[in-house]
Image (cartoon, helix red, strand yellow):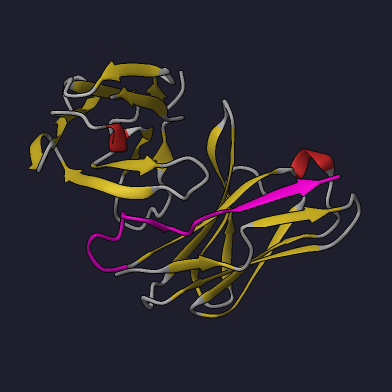
Amino acid sequence: DVKVTQSSRYLVKRTGEKVFLECVQDMDHENMFWYRQDPGLGLRLIYFSYDVKMKEKGDIPEGYSVSREKKERFSLILESASTNQTSMYLCASSSLGRPQETQYFGPGTRLLVL
Amino acid sequence: QKEVEQDPGPLSVPEGAIVSLNCTYSNSAFQYFMWYRQYSRKGPELLMYTYSSGNKEDGRFTAQVDKSSKYISLFIRDSQPSDSATYLCAMISGGSNYKLTFGKGTLLTVNP
């Protein structure tokens, strides 16, 4: 079974703090993704990575950065957290092999920025 | 027009009912279609995956794709309270395009 784990289920941070969200997958997947999910807005792609040290912006990259130093690990960084970044953050991974289009999600991190 | 439209519901049905969940899309390049189920406060989990038009059945679940109408459906037979969740449709054009496009999800409640 594919397993995607996220470092925290719940986080509370203060405005201006630097926040790191970690994601690890154990299936040797090439692709990894970070989404945020908000009521009424659905899932929105922040960044994705198709290889180590490679990254591409998604639909809402502003205020975020990412790091992928190892194939199994993809980190999302909030350089200076703001209250509008309070959200559910979901990590996902997928393989270049068939079915490459299928993404497997982690349990999510609920971030509250005060 | 949004790329993927999905009625957010909420949808409430009695146990044992047949449930129909739907999405429409505008991008004719979409080739692969998925349904994810998301329980409250959990990550989405892949429920079904189909390619091109036609039907695919898995137990009580049937996924249907009509590419000519740009319309996909998920049917749940003999619905159970454990089916209560948000259902998200997702689709992708395939090839080197890694980006899934999601519907906003439909909240389903199955009442015992």
**Which residue appears at 35% of the width and 39% of the height?**
B90
Q: In the rendered image of this protein, does residue B99 appear above or below residue A51? A: above
Q: Nearer the viewer, residue B41 or B1?
A: B41
Q: Main secondary structure of the magenta part?
A: loop
Q: Can residue B25 be seen in this view?
A: no
Q: Where is residue B5 in the image (x, y as percent from the top left)?
A: 40, 22
Q: Position of residue B74 (x, y in %)?
A: 21, 30
Q: Residue at x 34, y 43 (%)?
A: B36
Residue A106 lies in magenta, yes or no? yes
* Picture quadrant of residue A101: bottom left
Look at 28% across and 31% down and name the residue there: B28
State the quadrant of the N terminus of chain A: bottom left
Q: What segment carries the magenta color?
A: A96-114
Q: Assess whether residue B95 is covered by the magenta stretch.
A: no
Left or right: residue B109 versus residue A40 is left
Name above or below for residue A102 compared with residue B22: below
Residue A107's place in the image compared with B56, above or below, is below
Residue B11, by quadrant, is top left
Question: From this viewpoint, is residue A28 visible?
Answer: yes
Q: In this view, does B8 lie above or below A74?
A: above
- Closest to the observer, A59 or A1: A1
Residue A83 lies, in percent from the top left, at 82, 41
